[in-house]
C-alpha cells in the first residue's frame, strides 16, 4: 500500500505534487493547508487524512482536527502539524509512524522503532529549502518512506 504525504501547501497545490500523489491508496496532509479547495482536490485522488496547521484559520479550518490517527491494516500513523507539539510517546501508544510538517524541512528517520516523516513543503518556496512531498510504503507492519522533490 502506498500513502502519499504532503504538507505546508499554504494555498498552492502544484501540478507536480498532484502527479506524485496520483495512484496513492491514501493521502496525508500534515497541515498549513491554506485553502479548503486543496482538501477537496486531494480527497478526489484518494482517501484523505488531514490536520490543521498553525496558519490554517477561518471557518473551514475549524473543521480540520489538530491531530489524527490513520490506521492501515495493522499499522497506526499519528499525524500532527508541529512535531514539537507531540504530546505522547509514539512507541508506547502503539504508533508505527509519526507524520508532521511545519518546519518545511524534509526528514525521514527512525527513533525507538518508530518512523518519523516530515515531507517538507509542497507550497511556495521558503528560502533554499526544496519543494517536496513523500510516500510511505506499507507492507504488513513494515514501513519505508522516501521524500521526492516535486518543484
Image (cartoon, rainbow, N blue to C red):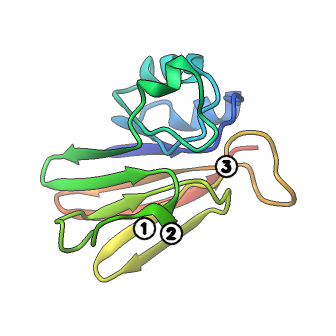
Residue 49 relative to residue 90: left or right: right
* Discs 2/1, front: 1
Look at mark 1 in the image and give the residue it sits on.
Answer: 116
Residue 129 found in image quarter:
bottom right
Quarter placement of the C terminus: top right
Image coords of residue 24 (percent x, y)? 41, 36
Residue 1 found in image quarter:
top left
* Discs 2/3, front: 3
Look at mark 2 in the image and give the residue it sits on.
Answer: 108
Alpha carbon separation for disc pair 2 and 3: 14 Å
Mark 2 or mark 1, earlier in chain: 2
Is 97 or 90 nearer to us in this picture?
90
The answer to whether residue 96 is above or below residue 49 is below
Image coords of residue 12 (percent x, y)? 71, 29
Crowding near pointer 2: few (<14 within 10 Å), some, many (20+)? some
Q: Secondary structure at mark 2?
A: strand
Look at mark 3 in the image and give the residue it sits on.
Answer: 121
The answer to whether residue 36 is above or below residue 84 is above
Amino acid at each position: 500500500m502506498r500513502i502519499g504525504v504532503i504538507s505546508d501547501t499554504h494555498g498552492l497545490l502544484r501540478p507536480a505534487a498532484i502527479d506524485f500523489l496520483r495512484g496513492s491508496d491514501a493521502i496525508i496532509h500534515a497541515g498549513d493547508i491554506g485553502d479548503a479547495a486543496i482538501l477537496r482536490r486531494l480527497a478526489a485522488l484518494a482517501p484523505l487524512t488531514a490536520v490543521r496547521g498553525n496558519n490554517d484559520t477561518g471557518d473551514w479550518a475549524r473543521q480540520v482536527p489538530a491531530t489524527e490517527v490513520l490506521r492501515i491494516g495493522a499499522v497506526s500513523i499519528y499525524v500532527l502539524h508541529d512535531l514539537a507539539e507531540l504530546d505522547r510517546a509514539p512507541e508506547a501508544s502503539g504508533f508505527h509512524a509519526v507524520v508532521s510538517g511545519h518546519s518545511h524541512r524534509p526528514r525521514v528517520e527512525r527513533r525507538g522503532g518508530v518512523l518519523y516523516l516530515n515531507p517538507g513543503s509542497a507550497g511556495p518556496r521558503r528560502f533554499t529549502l526544496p519543494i517536496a512531498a513523500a510516500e510511505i510504503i506499507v507492507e504488513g507492519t513494515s514501513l519505508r518512506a522516501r521524500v521526492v522533490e516535486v518543484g
